[in-house]
Image: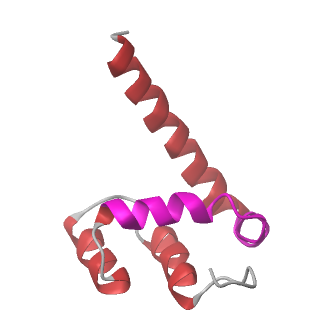
Amino acid sequence: MDDKGVLSDTDRAILDLEERMPAHSGAKERAIRELTGTGPARYYQRCDNLIELPEVIAERPMLVNRLMRLRAQRTTSRNRRILGR
């Protein structure tokens, strides 16, 4: 995102990739590296930040809902492992 709150081409490409390739795979990891020049960890951090933005929520509500649901599931799973439940 730029200083004016406008999504960059890379931000839009990340959202497009998430819509096209929802499951994590070797092909998706290669696409992530080609698209962003970073590894999956940075990519998913950026993706997590994007889905919090009002303009992304307004433009792609179904994608945002799916990604938020997956994030909540990961958080629950991680908390259970940490707490031993």
Q: Residue at x 53, y 57 (%)?
A: 48
Q: Is residue 26 above or below residue 69?
A: below
Q: Is residue 6 left or right of residue 26?
A: right
Which one is nearer the viewer's eye here, 75 or 28?
75
The question of residue 42 being in magenta is answered with yes
Q: Position of residue 85 (x, y in %)?
A: 38, 9
Highlighted range, magenta: 41-60
Residue 62's image quarter?
Answer: bottom right
Seen as rendered, the residue at the extreme left is 26
Image: 11 above or below 74? below
Asked if residue 59 lies left or right of residue 27, the reply is right
Q: Quadrant of residue 82?
A: top left
Question: Looking at this view, is 6 or 71 the one in front?
Answer: 6
Residue drawn at point x = 55 percent, y = 53 percent = 67
Name the spot of residue 68 as percent of width and height, x first: 59, 48
The spot of residue 10 in percent (x, y) is 50, 85
Does the segment drawn in magenta span residue 33?
A: no
